[in-house]
Image (cartoon, rainbow, N blue to C red):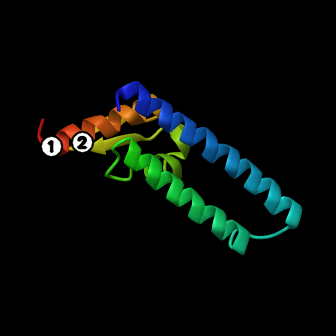
Amino acid sequence: MIHLEKAKAIAEWQETMEELEEHQNKLADFFRCAFDAPLFEAIAAMQSKYTKAVAQSVGDENDWLLWYWMDNDFGRGKLNAVFDGVQFPARTAGELAAVIEMHNQWREGT
C-alpha cells in the first residue's frame, strides 16, 4: 500500500470513529446511561477490532493509530509522535501515515 492509500485508509477510519463517537454521545444522553453499559462496551470492542484491522492494513505494528485516537484526539491534541529521540508532526491522517512509514523504516534499519 502506497502512502496516499494509507493516508486515505486512516482518514476513513478517523471519520468513521468520529461519527461513531458522536452517535455514542447522543445515545448516552438519550438513554441517560454510562459508557460502561453493555451497549457501549460492545461498541468499544468493535472500535478496538476495527482499529486493529486498519492498523494491520496500513502496516502499523506499533499502535500509532491507537495513540492518534486515544492520546492525540485524532490530531487535535497537537502532539508529536516521537521515536529515536526525534519528534514528528501527527496532526493529520497523512502525517500519521508518514510517521508509521518512517517508524517502520527506522525499525528495519533502512
Which amino acid type is shown beneath numbered disc 1?
Glu
Say which quarter of the image contains residue 98: top left
Q: Outermost residue, left direction?
A: 109
Amino acid type of the residue tagged 2 in the rendering? Asn
Secondary structure of residue under mark 1: helix
What number is the disc on residue 78? none
Residue at 33% across, 36% down: 99
Q: Secondary structure at mark 2?
A: helix
Q: In this view of the protein, which residue sits in the foreground, 10 or 74?
A: 10
Is any atom of residue 64 visible in this view?
no
Which of these two is toward me, 74 or 16? 16
Would residue 31 be found to the left or right of residue 73 on screen? right
- Figure check: 90 above or below 83: above
Q: Is residue 30 left or right of residue 63?
A: right
In whole angstroms, how far apart are the C-alphas of marks 2 and 1? 6 Å
| Disc 2 to disc 1: CB gap under 8 Å | yes
- Which residue appears at 76% of the width and 51% of the height? 23
Along the line of sight, which residue is nearer the eye, 38 or 5?
5
Instruction: Give residue 108's mark.
Output: 1
What quarter of the picture does the N terminus occupy?
top left
Q: Quadrant of the C terminus?
A: top left
- Residue at figure coordinates x 20%, y 44% from the top left: 84
Tell me what residue is drawn at x 64 percent, y 70 percent. 41
Q: Position of residue 30 (x, y in %)?
A: 88, 60
Q: Which disc number belongs to residue 104?
A: 2
